[in-house]
Image (cartoon, rainbow, N blue to C red):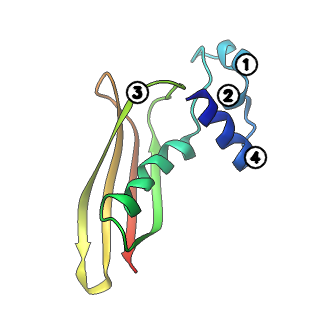
């Protein structure tokens, strides 16, 4: 939501007008403000401790790529799958992606998680 974008910007001190100023956003080629990339990847990372692999795991690192803008109020789906398991280290590599209503990947994240 627009409120999520503003709250995240205030929390992180990311005051880029592309995220925070609707008038500025409308003057860009996107014609709207954009959701912060770090907020998008945070939603993907949120799956780690809550769903996959779930409780008892922590995120060690993330590498995210932002392919297309996401606008406040735009519905997206998040899909996270296991890419690789390193049992000897208690580590799992996850592939997360955020897909818009056109079926395009707007954000992709590789997440390394470790068992606690």
Q: Residue at x 45, y 30 (%)?
A: 68
Is label 3 or label 2 in front?
A: 3
Which class describes the residues within 10 Å of circle 1: few (<14), some (14-19), or many (20+)? some
| Residue 109 spot, x, y in % from top left | 40, 51
Q: Residue at x 62, y 23 (%)?
A: 33
Q: Secondary structure at mark 3?
A: loop
| Residue 3 spot, x, y in % from top left | 63, 31
Q: Secondary structure at mark 2?
A: helix
Q: Secondary structure at mark 1?
A: helix
Distance from disc 1 to disc 2, alpha carbons, whole Å, reads: 7 Å
Which quarter of the rendering shows the N terminus? top right
Distance from disc 3 to disc 1, alpha carbons, whole Å, reads: 23 Å
Q: Are marks 1 and 2 in contact (CB under 8 Å)?
A: yes
Whichever of callouts 3 and 4 sits on the residue coming sooner in the sequence is 4
Report the residue marked by disc 1: 24
Q: Point out which mark residue 75 bears.
A: 3
Report the residue marked by disc 4: 13
Which quarter of the rendering shows the C terminus? bottom left
Whichever of callouts 3 and 1 sits on the residue coming sooner in the sequence is 1
Q: Residue at x 30, y 70 (%)?
A: 92
Is label 4 or label 1 in front?
A: 4
């Amino acid at each position: 939501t627009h409120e999520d974008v503003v709250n995240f910007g205030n929390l992180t001190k990311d005051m880029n007008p592309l995220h925070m100023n609707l008038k500025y956003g409308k003057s860009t080629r996107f014609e709207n403000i954009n959701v912060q990339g770090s907020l998008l990847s945070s939603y993907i990372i949120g799956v780690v401790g809550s769903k996959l692999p779930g409780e008892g795991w922590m995120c060690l690192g993330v590498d995210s790529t932002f392919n297309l803008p996401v606008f406040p109020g735009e519905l997206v789906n998040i899909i996270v799958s296991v890419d690789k398991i390193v049992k000897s280290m208690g580590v799992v590599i996850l592939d997360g992606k955020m897909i818009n209503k056109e079926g395009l990947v707007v954000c992709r994240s590789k997440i390394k998680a470790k068992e606690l």
